[in-house]
Amino acid sequence: MSRATSDTSGVAATALAGERPPSQRLWLLIAAVTLAGLALVALGVWDSDGVDWRAVMFLAVLAIAAERLDLDLYVDSRVSVAFVPIFASVVLAGFSGPALVVPLAILASSVGTQRPPLYKTAFNFGALMIAAATSVLILRSLGSASQPGAWPVVIGPALLAAAANHVVNSGLIVAAISLSSDARFISVWRERFLWLWPHDLVLGVLGLAIATAYTAMGLWGLAVFLVPPAMMQLSIKQYLDRTTKGVLELRQAHDQLKEAHAQVTNAMGSLQRAYDGTLRALVAALDARDSETGGHSERVAELSMAIAADMGVDRKSAEWRHMQWGALLHDVGKIAVPDEILRKPAKLSEHEWETMRAHSSAGYQIVRGVEFLEETAEIVYAHHERVDGAGYPRGLRGEEIPLGSRIFAVADAFDAMTSDRPYRSALPSEEALAELIRNSGSQFDPAVVNAFIGVYQKRFLQRRGSGRSEGGLDPALKKAILEAAGLGDPQ
């Protein structure tokens, strides 16, 4: 039974206390239940005429033994079969039976190395007495049909009385749990007690059988019917001893896995930061060497990822990481380009252009040698390809070009056009956007350009109707750009 029918005692006691002291409403409930239990004990003493105290005392001994031999469950619950002698005392002696059996069973359950607080013990006592009294009232209301010797007719009243006992006892416990934890009554009932009703019904029938055996055979009848609950308790103990060990081992393994997972996650995060830090340091060195485009790689990477996000690329995916690294490392091949060509302020000769264009292949060879950058290397290799096939070094077309390279091409071109160069000043952002739109479908992927337009609206255009956008462009050109961006007439 539960400790609160003495059958799930641990559940009741633990849930009643929780991690905080009882509230005022919970104290009122505890006081009311305890006083009701005391009043029912007094009623049992007063209504004791004709009670066979020898049988009741024997049942009390059984209840004490069941409580002292109760079993620990996996979390904070305990199980015993003390409900059997308690219910048998209800059938045999009415109010007087539980008036003796319940207090002794509760005292037995509260003695030990881990004594529950007094208010828990008092509440459990009162809840058990009220539930037992409910069973007595039901059995008495059914008259002779509920007498132990009236088999099999008596089974129906006994089941009804056991069910009422379960509902009342568990209902009081659930009320206490709800008050102590602010949980919903019905949620606590379903989680902790709904599964117990068949258990209590079976134990109620067993209690009835013990009472019937005593009526027919005296104490020998009680002794005979001790075997089933004793074997039940032994079976439960053997099962729990075996399964508890497995549960604890699984829980320990789970905790170890959680700890290992956290360590691996932290290590991966540290490694990721180390990767990024190393790559950014390398890119900063490259940009410092190519001083005319200082910060270019970081800006292009940031703008590329804004476009990728607008196109729905998952920020947590490997594709996202490789796009980011590819945008950062796109010019790593310029390590192989001599300074006199890389930093030349004038127009490059054809031979010098050939050398400069070779940086895509050189970058690919450098990056592909790093195992975790193999996919990144493909982006670096194709970052100067065009969707019409007129790019280099392989003349790839359309979707033959990795998406990261197609995104990079738009971001790189926009940053290049809006940055100062020794041979020209930066273009206004609207002119750069117009150039991207003009070359959509030839140099640039139209889907990427459309995504960039969305990014451009957020970053470079003021809200519609809020005034002039930057650059002071010709109104016709401005209107064309705004229409291409889906904003319509700025007027």
Image (cartoon, helix red, strand yellow):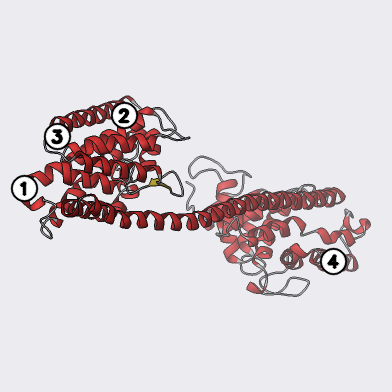
The amino acid type found where label 2 is placed reads: Leu
Q: Residue at x 34, y 37 (%)?
A: 177
Rendering coords of residue 255 (x, y %): 58, 50
Answer few, some or many: residues within 10 Å of disc 1's Cα (few below 14, many 20 plus, some between 14 and 19): few
Between marks 3 and 4, how big is the CA–CA gap?
Answer: 103 Å
Residue placed most toward the observer, 469 or 182: 182
Answer few, some or many: residues within 10 Å of disc 3's Cα (few below 14, many 20 plus, some between 14 and 19): some
Marks 2, 1: nearer the viewer: 1
Q: The residue tagged with tag 4: helix, strand or loop?
A: helix
Between marks 3 and 1, how big is the CA–CA gap?
Answer: 18 Å
Q: Residue at x 17, y 45 (%)?
A: 92
- From where the camera sits, is residue 476 visible? no
Q: The residue tagged with tag 1: helix, strand or loop?
A: helix
On the rendered structure, is 389 left or right of 191? right
The circle on residue 362 is 4
The amino acid type found where label 4 is placed reads: Ala
Of pointers 2 and 1, the one earlier in the residue sequence: 2
The amino acid type found where label 3 is placed reads: Ser
Disc 2 target residue: 26
Please tell me whether residue 124 is drawn above or below residue 1 in the rendered image: above
Disc 3 target residue: 48
